[in-house]
Image (spheres, helix red, strand yellow):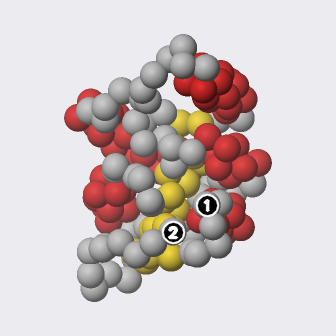
Amino acid sequence: MLHIYVDADACPVKNEVYKVAQRYGLPVTLVANSYMKIPGATTWLKLVVVDQGLDGADDWIVEQAGKDDIVVTGDIPLAARCLDKGARVLGHAGRPFTPENVGDSLATRQLMKQLREQGIMMGGPPPFSPKDRALFLQQLDQMIQAIRRVR
């Protein structure tokens, strides 16, 4: 059965994931480095707290995610690892990561890191917007429908 895994520590779209998962009757696992409050009394939603350091949550998700599961993350290296396992990956702003675009995303991430370290570029990504939220909802819905059509 299709399962949604959420890299939950800094995920701004958890409520959107809940909404879509409930509509389709899909299980969701939030994976985090520390406890967080989740909606209570649900059988389809669970929280896994890992304490194996910075990459503990990422490693747990990679171990669990399989072909055609969906991973929600903004972490590009995690996205690449999940794609290698056959999972589908969706970024917080609604951008799907694919085998075709994840290499470019990793290269851009590295370049931006170097520019920040050299003081050439300051700041991070633009603020999360309602448009990002809407695009995320649309893309998650489309991703679920595409997986279901193939199964």
Q: Is residue 117 left or right of residue 32?
A: right
Residue lying furthest right = 84
Instruction: Tell me, yes or no, if residue 63 can be seen here.
Output: yes
- Kind of residue at disc 1: Leu
Q: In this view, does 142 lie to the left or right of 138?
A: right
Instruction: Tell me, yes or no, if residue 142 can be seen here.
Output: no
Q: Secondary structure beneath disc 2?
A: loop
Question: Which badge, 2 or 1, is on the more N-terminal residue?
Answer: 2
Whether 140 is drawn above or below 71: the answer is above
Tell me if mark 1 has few (under 14), some (14-19) or many (20+) residues whose alpha carbon lies within 10 angstroms of its own: few
Which of the 4 image quarters holds residue 17? Answer: bottom left
Asked if the residues shown at circle 2 and circle 1 are in contact, with their CB atoms under 8 angstroms apart, the answer is yes
Residue at 65% of width from left, 60% of height from top?
55
Residue lying furthest front = 119
Query: Of residues 151 and 38, which is closer to you in this image?
Result: 38
**Residue 103, position in %: x, y?**
72, 29
**Residue 3, position in %: x, y?**
53, 65
**Residue 98, position in %: x, y?**
64, 35
If the image is split into quadrants, where does the N terminus sit? bottom right
Whether 60 is drawn above or below 104: the answer is below
Residue position marked by numbered label 1 in the rendering: 54
Residue lying furthest left = 130
If the image is split into quadrants, where does the C terminus sit? bottom right
Residue at 71% of width from left, 67% of height from top?
63
- Kind of residue at disc 2: Asn
Which of the 4 image quarters holds residue 21? Answer: bottom left
Q: Secondary structure beneath disc 1?
A: loop
**Residue 12, position in %: x, y?**
34, 49
> Which circle marks residue 33 in the picture?
2
